[in-house]
Amino acid sequence: MRNVIAFLERLLSAVLIVIFTVMVLAIIWQVFARYVLLSPTVWSEELARYSMVWTTMLGSALVLRRSEHVAVTVFVDILPQPLQIAIACLRDVIVVVMGGYIAYFGFEFALRGQVRLASGIGVPMSYAYFALPVGGALIALFVVANRLMDKGRVA
């Protein structure tokens, strides 16, 4: 299991680098086209926006995997260790349920988006919407993996 999760983490990092690079290049092109060429493009803004959605969902999963998310633990830190562990378990259950919820309903939403086309780039909206189920599933998977591999034991 550790090898699969490590592979997914490396793959996700590489995919995020590519998506983030595409987003930055699309924004640079948009600014250049608007202010230098005086001819703004619709596709670059739309591509940057959808890249940001994918970066947000996939980046959230990666940050949770690495336990690098922002956490305010001032109240949890003053509790006894057994209670800290119980709160961490409750937190993980809530995150897994929410990740599953996002994945399930995001998948349905993405399927409905197949009939709509993005106005600027002309692809089905489901390409952008599929960030929800993929990100939600990865979030749930990584939280479970962290718990099973004893990572993130305390809040």
Image (cartoon, rainbow, N blue to C red):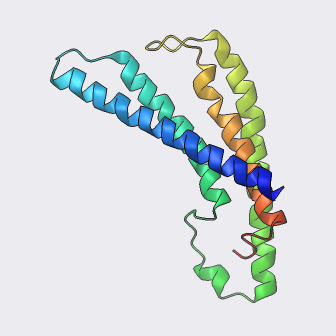
Indicate left or right for 54 with 148 as reference.
Answer: left
106 or 44, which is in the foreground? Answer: 44
Residue drawn where x is 72% and y is 20% of the image? 111
Q: How many marks?
A: 0
Indicate left or right for 83 with 21 as reference.
Answer: right
Residue drawn where x is 36% and y is 17% of the image? 42
Residue 84: x, y in percent?
75, 80
Give the vertical position of 17 relative to 92 (above or below).
above
Give the vertical position of 93 relative to 56 (above or below).
below
Q: Quadrant of the image for the N terminus?
A: bottom right
Residue drawn where x is 66% and y is 41% of the image? 135
Give the vertical position of 86 relative to 21 (above or below).
below
Q: Quarter-wise, where is residue 102 in the image? A: top right
Give the vertical position of 96 relative to 11 (above or below).
below
Indicate left or right for 71 with 80 as reference.
Answer: left
Q: Quarter-wise, where is residue 134 in the image? A: top right
Residue 2: x, y in percent?
79, 58
Residue 105: x, y in percent?
75, 33
Q: Quarter-wise, where is residue 37 in the image? A: top left
28 or 74, which is in the foreground? Answer: 28
Indicate left or right for 29 with 88 as reference.
Answer: left
47 or 116, which is in the foreground? Answer: 47
Residue drawn where x is 65% and y is 10% of the image? 115
Q: Quadrant of the image for the C terminus?
A: bottom right
